[in-house]
Image (cartoon, helix red, strand yellow):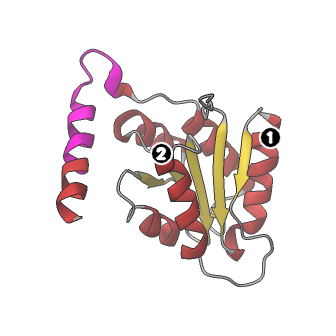
Amino acid sequence: MQHRDVSKIITLGSDHAGFHLKRQIIKYLENQGYEVIDRGTLSDEPCDYPDFAEPVARDVISGNARFGILICGTGIGMSIVANKFPGIRAALCSNEFSARYARQHNDANVLTLGGRVIGTDLALSILHVFLNTDFAGVKPGEERHVRRIEKISKIESALK
């Protein structure tokens, strides 16, 4: 059986408030050579964000995708749902600085965005930084980041 390379696979989900931004992000990702898994919604008809956050979180946890992207009106609801899943480190980012440090220091694996908070250009810039920033914890002298993530994992395990 072949091992599937997920380094260029991104899973996405949005509710109605994030639908239009999600479509722009999908175009961007495909133009960058990423394979996209679209977990919905497929229109701007009112719907419930937890229904889309869950399959995206499960894609990331299972290893079917390298990263997840979730979009709702503010990004807050999606972030709350995604962070209920052990192993998910979802970061709500509204600027490039937050996206860079979410990846460098927290090894965030899900990016959440507010479709009613930021415009398309800023969202794509945040996404670019998120996707192109490596976790710093693998570098000598940066082990504190690994230690902190391990502490998060212990908390998650204790809550099961």
Which residue sits at x=74%, y=40%?
35
Residue that badge 1 annotates: 30
- Kindly report the secondary structure that dominates the magenta region of the rendered protein: helix
Q: Are marks 2 and 1 in contact (CB under 8 Å)?
A: no
Report helix, strand or loop for mark 1. helix
Amino acid beneath label 1: Glu
52 sits to left or right of 29: left
Q: Nearer the viewer, residue 82 or 23?
A: 82
Which stretch appears magenta? 137-152
Please provide percent x and percent y for residue 41.
72, 70
Report helix, strand or loop for mark 2. loop
Amino acid beneath label 2: Asn
Which residue sits at x=38%, y=65%?
84
Residue that badge 2 annotates: 109
136 inside magenta stretch? no
Classify 32 as above or below 110.
above
- Between the residue at mark 2 and the residue at mark 1, the CA separation in whole angstroms equals 19 Å
Please provide percent x and percent y for residue 110.
51, 50
